[in-house]
Image: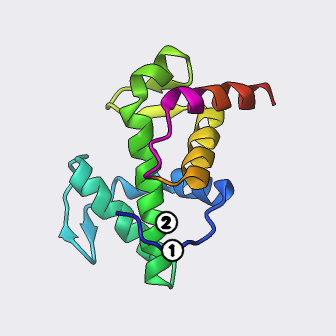
């Protein structure tokens, strides 16, 4: 899964990547994977994200590492969407996309960066951290 190499991936950098994703999700062609069309499938969006990160970093190991972390964070939020939605930290918009509160994004980012993406961080712990971050 995620490589053993460790690169710094601060929240601000992650947030910049998130801002780029609406545009990246519109890409129909990638140089690495060819034509992906306009479907918003997991496979197509993963190809787009890998292309984007490869364009952002000259070091291919750093690009892959950060792309994996980014996708793991997105996946974690999606897998726990019901709980986060119920607690008012995530809402689903038209087109089946999610809009997450900044406190939730920071909490998930922190938990997965600090604990490691394979640590099995409990969603309730992330929720507690997000609620604490909302106060600030």
Q: CA distance from mark 2 to mark 1?
A: 10 Å
Q: Is mark 2 in CB contact (under 8 Å) with mark 1?
A: yes
| Relative side of 29 to 108, left or right | left
Q: From this view, report whether residue 2 is shown above or below residue 130.
A: below
Where residue 101 sits, quadrant-wise, is top right
Residue at 66% in and 34% down: 103
Check disc 1: other Cα within 10 Å, few if <14, some if 14-19, many if 20+. few
Q: Which residue is mark 2?
A: 66
Q: Is residue 60 visible?
A: yes
- Please name whichever residue, 66 or 43, is drawn nearer the observer in this view of the structure: 66
Q: Is residue 22 visible?
A: no
42 is within the stretch colored magenta: no
| Relative side of 115 to 51, left or right | right
Q: Quadrant of the C terminus?
A: top right
Asked which secondary structure carries label 1, the reply is helix
Where residue 74 sits, quadrant-wise, is top left
| Residue range highlighted in magenta | 118-127
């Amino acid at each position: 899964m995620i490589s053993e190499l460790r690169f710094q991936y601060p929240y601000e950098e992650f947030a910049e990547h998130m801002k780029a994703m609406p545009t990246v999700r519109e890409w129909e062609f990638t140089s690495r994977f060819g034509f992906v069309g306009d479907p918003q499938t997991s496979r197509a969006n993963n190809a787009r994200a890998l292309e984007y990160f490869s364009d952002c970093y000259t070091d291919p190991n750093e690009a892959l590492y950060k792309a994996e972390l980014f996708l793991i964070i997105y996946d974690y939020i999606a897998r726990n969407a019901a709980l986060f939605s119920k607690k008012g930290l995530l809402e689903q918009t038209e087109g089946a996309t999610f809009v997450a509160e900044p406190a939730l994004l920071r909490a998930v980012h922190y938990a997965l960066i600090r604990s490691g993406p394979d640590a099995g961080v409990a969603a309730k712990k992330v929720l507690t951290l997000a609620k604490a971050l909302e106060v600030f």
